[in-house]
Amino acid sequence: MSILFANATVVTMDPARPVLTDAFVAVEGTKILSVGTAHPAGEFDRVVDCAGKVMMPGLVNAHTHVPMTLMRGYGGGCDLHTWLNKYIFPAEARLDDRCVAAGAALGLAEMIATGTTCIADMYMNTETIARTVLDAGISANLACGAVYFGDPADFSPEKCNDCGNHIRLYENWHNAGDGQILVDASIHAEYTSCAPAWEWVADFAQKHNLGMHVHVSETQSEHEKCIEKYGKTPAALLDQYGVWENGGIAAHCVYLSGGDAELFARRGVTAVHNPVSNLKLMSGVAPLFFLRECGMNVALGTDGVASNNSHNMFEEMKVAALIQNYSFGEDHGQLSAADILAMATVNGARALRRNAGVIAPGKIADLILVDFTAPNLFPCHDIMENLVYSAAPSNVVMNMARGKIIYENGTFLTLDMDRIRAEVSNYALPHIFGEK
């Protein structure tokens, strides 16, 4: 299908021409065909008048646990490790495929309505998530997050269920939907696994040329206990076992030290900053100025809704900007709105090996429209400032993922919200929490 967006103000994220006014963006199939201020030649199946609206690349949520939408606000008021062990791990032990499908559908609906077009998700029952993602229409890098609590001496791929999960996920889903789904290799974290598991996952990633997805140095206690136990930071320890050979994403990176950021920059590892989750769980603030100065790519994520309460990437952008300016601005100045927008778009796309995040010919047509006639976005003296500091999810009026409009003016075009609500209310919540 061919679609022409006309009369658009376009935030391209292309440094050569960052904002275009009265522009035309043509889409053919899954790709952007042309971008410019002259009306393109040819006929189009649909013409969308974008007067009063701003077009920008779809948001890339580079670290999620989508089915945790079912645990929104559960176990609030705790630090990370109390929250995990007292609330989350027991609840997750009661999940089944049907619960995961319901939670994934609800989380994807929330993200689609709030402007996200691509995610990197780490969770269990990952093939169930893959089926839901394929139906929803957004792009996703999926990973199962290997966990192994057994004796390292007893480790074998047969005894670690997540080794088999890696194999099945890759064989059944990598490049599904003509690249809509990509599979990443993944270790949940240093503290939930051991060296033989790290070696197996690293070898799997190298054999199949997969990126890596790992929680790294989210809390000070996690970071310091690793140094005490192994004599190395989590980043350096995992590097010893080849985990970062193909690059990938390191979620959180709040307490990197001892050359970790420089190591990640050399390996092509992106730091995924999750400011709202980190603040809610009292984990700390990642030093983005320092990470960038060391050469790291920095992207943004929401983490799971259980530790965040929403998949609101506009909130992540604003909080990321404010907390960096407060914590480090005296020495570094402010992060610009363009810097923050890049973290939420092109930087995330680069981290996930996606040809997206920029509105330019040949790029994947992941596009959203934001209504700038809304009271909270008027008047507008600077479009990027408004997007970072003023915009809200309710301002998103259209979501196009891979050239297909999947949400428009409050209507979901790929998901059945009545069915999703019924599944969550009548099956998933009673199954997990024994309530209805």
Image: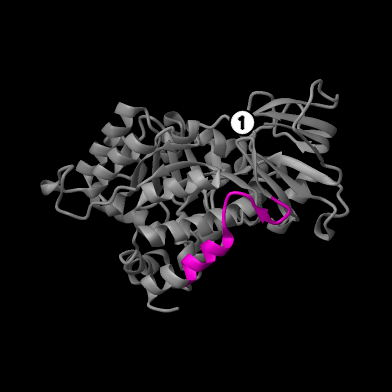
Quadrant assignment, res 79:
bottom left
Q: Tell me the colour scheme of the image.
A: one colour
Q: Is residue 186 above or below residue 325?
A: above
Residue 260 higher or lower than 128, as above or below: above
Q: Amino acid at mark 1?
A: Thr
- Please identify the quarter of the rendering in which residue 7 is found: top right
What residue appears at the point 29 percent right and 27 percent down from the top-left corner?
A: 207
Q: Is residue 41 left or right of residue 179?
A: right
* Image quadrant where residue 345 sits: top right
Q: Which residue is nearer to you in this view: 301 or 263? A: 301
Does dot 1 land on a helix, a strand or a loop? loop
Residue 344, x across and y down, in percent: 61, 44
Question: Is any atom of residue 78 visible in this view?
Answer: no
Quarter of the image for the N terminus: give it.
top right
Q: Nearer the viewer, residue 268 or 425?
A: 425
Magenta part of the chain: 408-425
The residue beneath circle 1 is: 30
Residue 205 shows up from this direction? yes
